[in-house]
Image (tube, grey):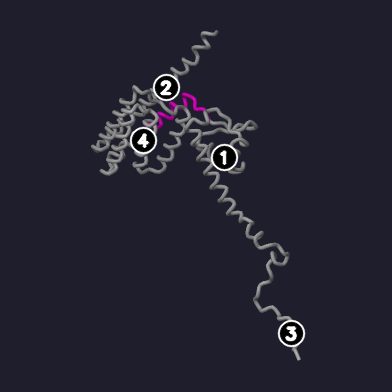
Amino acid sequence: MNAKVSPRPAAAGRSAPSSAAATNVPSAAVVNIAHPTITLLQTSSLANVVQGELERMILSGELAPGAKLTEAALAARLGVSRGPLREAFRMLEEAGLVRTEKNRGVYVRAIPLDEAAEIFDLRAAMDELVGRRLAEQITAPQVKEVRALVDRMEQAVKARDAGQYHLLNLQFHDRLVELAGNRKLTAIYRKLIKELSLFRRMNLADRMLPISVGEHRQIVKAIAAGDADAAGRAMFEHAIGSKERTIRNHQAAAASDAAPLERSA
């Protein structure tokens, strides 16, 4: 005779059935509900990528000063939603590359001449500090590294490649600031350089390149010699010279643009 089997009582401490099982919700549906922290990290990471791409487009001139950044168009172009795009706009505004106008939208900043001159003056003071510090602490391998950059700049001059020279020029100065070892100064310097890029991307005519590369060689020579006064002075004068060239080029361009209007008037 078969004994009647009674239902086994739940063991002490055994957890109750999950809500997914109790409501017949497939377990995959539960797994796919993203944790708020994970969602935040994903959005933040994507916003950084978007910010980097927009910054590249702005600094390369693909998005010109004064251009409006349309959310719908950029979201479609970059394949992202508007959330990361808006966060990228916020980061770009903090970096000084865009401005937000209430009820109008987001625009690439246009740096006026007087503000560019102020940035150049500040940069010159920072460069002088960098030159003095490097003369006191630079190592032989680091001198070799920056000399190699100047060698490449000289090759660009011989090849009449102003675009390559411009990129190497930026790399040279950024590396000197980095080698100075002051992280706060490096961050501020890079922000200023990006803002200056909105004012002018290339400031050196072909005839000026040999003069410019000679100034860079003089900077490296003073730093390598450990002459803090000469290194600081060379870097300061180089930055001020760049400021003066920029102002002259800007004024000449403005006069050239105004000439046809004056003739028609």
* CA distance for labels 1 and 2: 36 Å
220 w.r.t. 257: above or below: below
Relative placement, left or right, of 102 versus 120 is: right
Element under label 1? helix
Label 4 or label 1, whichever comes before in sequence order: 1
Instruction: Kindly state the secondary structure of the residue where label 3 is placed.
Output: loop
* Range shown magenta: 109-125
Label 2–label 4 contact, CB within 8 A = no
Residue drawn at point x = 75 percent, y = 89 percent = 2
Amino acid under label 4? Answer: His
Vertical relation: 23 (above or below) 174: below
Other residues around mark 4 within 10 Å, as few (<14) / some (14–19) / many (≥20)? some
Q: Of the residues shown, which amino acid type is indicated by label 3?
A: Val
Q: Which residue is mark 1?
A: 78
Percent x, y of residue 177? 36, 39
The residue indicated by pointer 3 is 5
> Which is nearer the N-term, disc 3 or disc 4?
3
Assess disc 2: are there few (<14), some (14-19) or many (≥20) residues with their C-alpha within 10 Å of its C-alpha: some
Is the residue under label 1 in contact with that under label 4 (CB below 8 Å)? Answer: no
Which residue carries the number 4 mark?
Answer: 173
Query: At label 1, which amino acid type do we have?
Result: Leu
| In this view, the mark in front (4 or 1) | 1
